Image: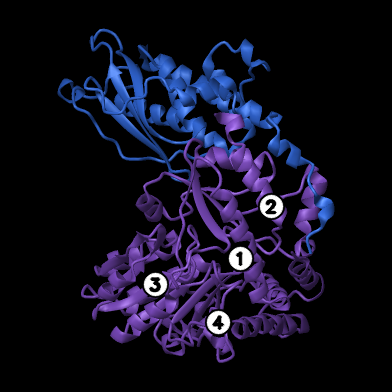
Amino acid sequence: MYVSTEQNAHNENLNSTKIPSSLASLYQEILVEHSKKPRHKVYSQPLSCVHCQEGKNPLCGDEIKLFIELKNTDDQFPPKFSVSFSGTGCSISQASCSMLCDKIQNVSYQEAKKICSYAEGIYSGKLQCPADENDFDDDVQALSGVAKFPVRVKCAALCWKTLEHACISLFDENGFLKHSQGEKTQNKKREHFRVVTE
Amino acid sequence: MWRNDFPIFENYTQQHSSPLRYLDSAATSMKPNAVIKAMSHFMETGYGSVHRGAYRLSVTASEKYEQARQRVAQFIGPEIDSNQVIFTRGTTESLNLLAAGFCEVLLTPECRIVVSEAEHHSNMIPWQQAAKKSECEIAYVSLVNENEGWQLNMEQAERLVSSNTKVVSVAHVGNVLGQTNSIAKFIELSKKVGAFCVVDCAQSAATHDINFLKLGADAVVFSAHKLFGPTGLGVLVLSKKLLNILPPYQYGGSMVSSVTLNGAEWSESPTKYEAGTPPLVEAIGLHAAIDWIESKGKENLKTHANELGKSFLSGLKEIKNVTLYEAKNETGSFNTQSIFSFRHNQVHAHDVATILDSHHIAVRAGHHCAWPLIQKLGVDALVRVSFGPYCAPEDVSDVLNGIKNLHKVLL
């Protein structure tokens, strides 16, 4: 039989306005704000997009699409690009997409690689962030709480891994476009790929 | 009810200073003391090699393994012989064994397989693959929404189970919406055209009569771990007719009657289908789990789940911003038992699950291994709540409170 001594003290928590501290670190204000008002989210493919990359998290059902727009195609220098996104998913995946697009505006492949690596350090917990949200240098640091929720790391990781995959397809090691000029203007739909949580 | 039989609840409370509200029994069930002790006692006192040794430990281990098989046969129905009971790794392997077997000996390009679009992937993908390999057709019975209740379209099923249909495979109870499907009708349709009928009882074996072989089904499958038993063990019960038709699924030790360098001959069922060292300790655990279920009574387990389900449903319907995907049973009544899926219109299913977990409430979020069903409902993810015999009214009130207060975190 069920034992009434288990009458839970946490009933109070359920009804109170207090958010458990573990949750507060995950759903930081900046992150929630990004999820509610995602930046650079589009509802149709931008005409100037040269490359789009779909990312899917098969376990969650999260599906996103990143649109890469080249900002210059001068063959003398590696091109810069900006990213926008579409898709559906949980608050973490949507906020992470929004933060990515905020960061990946008019950057080169080399710069994007560094930003992706930095973001991975944040959401995986390998890079330490200031304890106080108010001290964050940039919004991506609001992903720091995700590391304590192993099953949610993949939600944050999806867009960053998707961008990495897109960049590898699009750019050579020096950051120049791999494809010929004729192909540059074609939108390329890539196959879904899986983001695996470590 | 019966919560004290399951030590994880007391241990969890001690470890986390909060009771566990475990509402994910449709994924896997908790284990009663009786199962845990039976398995550890056996490993401490009677463990040995099954069907391979002349020494006493091997003999008694073999006897225990076969007793477990006999117990499973009795659990399903008095007329079931133990050689009809095959131990597999789980429901998924049972269904794969069937699909692969039918593919090898039965299916041709002219044939049709009928499943429903509401199936768990384990009762869909093996048939899709069998259809691809044999270049035959696979037809899906639709899930339809009639008078606010989702159910399988049985009128369509009558049309789909055609004269060229060789296999019909359907779940007894749906793993997402919890509906009880019209298995008797599927069996009747199958028999009319001479098709084999497979019934996935993974979600029903603990609470329902699953002796569909008596009605003419050809195979019944389920998993021990959803039956308060251990993981790694599944059951496949074959009709006597099917025993002689299906080829082995895997090859190796135990399943042969003779081997030469030129080839091998197979032993009879059930060993024909059990290559390798069998899941002995797991079988002991399943035996104990069945004893536990029958000591409480399936009807009592069902009534308990039904009471909690009704209470949960009535509370959930009062909460704003929640869409409940209600299902109808074969009788036309709404499902009120065990398994329910819903979505919050403003908080994504995964966020719901994480927020509830912070209150020690365990629910499932996602597509529940039923993508086509989720796509049919037009959503990307659902929250599922499912009840077990260890659930209490407090579990219901806590999860309802948790859902009511989701907005405090994210909205």
Query: Dividing the image into 4 quarters, which one contains the N terminus of chain A?
Result: bottom right
The residue tagged 2 is: B395
The residue tagged 3 is: B169
Subunit of label 4 = B
Report which colour depicts chain B.
purple
Report x, y in % for residue A42: 32, 25
Q: Is residue B260 above or below residue A145?
A: below
Query: Dividing the image into 4 quarters, which one contains the C terminus of chain A?
Result: top right
Extreme residue toward the left, this view: A182
The reply, left or right, for residue B269 in relation to residue A23 is left
- Mark 4 or 3: the one toward you: 3
Q: Tell me which numbered mark, 2 or 1, is placed earlier along the sequence.
A: 1
Judged from the image, the secondary structure of the residue bearing numbered disc 3 is strand
Task: Identify the residue at image location x=34%, y=35%.
Answer: A54
How far apart marks 2 and 1 lie (CA) works out to 14 Å
**Kind of residue at badge 1:** Asn
Q: Tell me which numbered mark, 4 or 3, is placed earlier along the sequence.
A: 4
How far apart marks 1 and 4 lie (CA) works out to 30 Å
Judged from the image, the secondary structure of the residue bearing numbered disc 1 is helix
Q: Tell me which numbered mark, 2 or 3, is placed earlier along the sequence.
A: 3
**Kind of residue at badge 4:** Val
The residue tagged 1 is: B306
- Mark 1 or 3: the one toward you: 1
Give residue A165's quadrant in the image.
Answer: top left
Subunit of label 1 = B
Report which colour depicts chain A.
blue
Report x, y in % for residue B210: 53, 78
Report x, y in % for residue B322: 50, 44
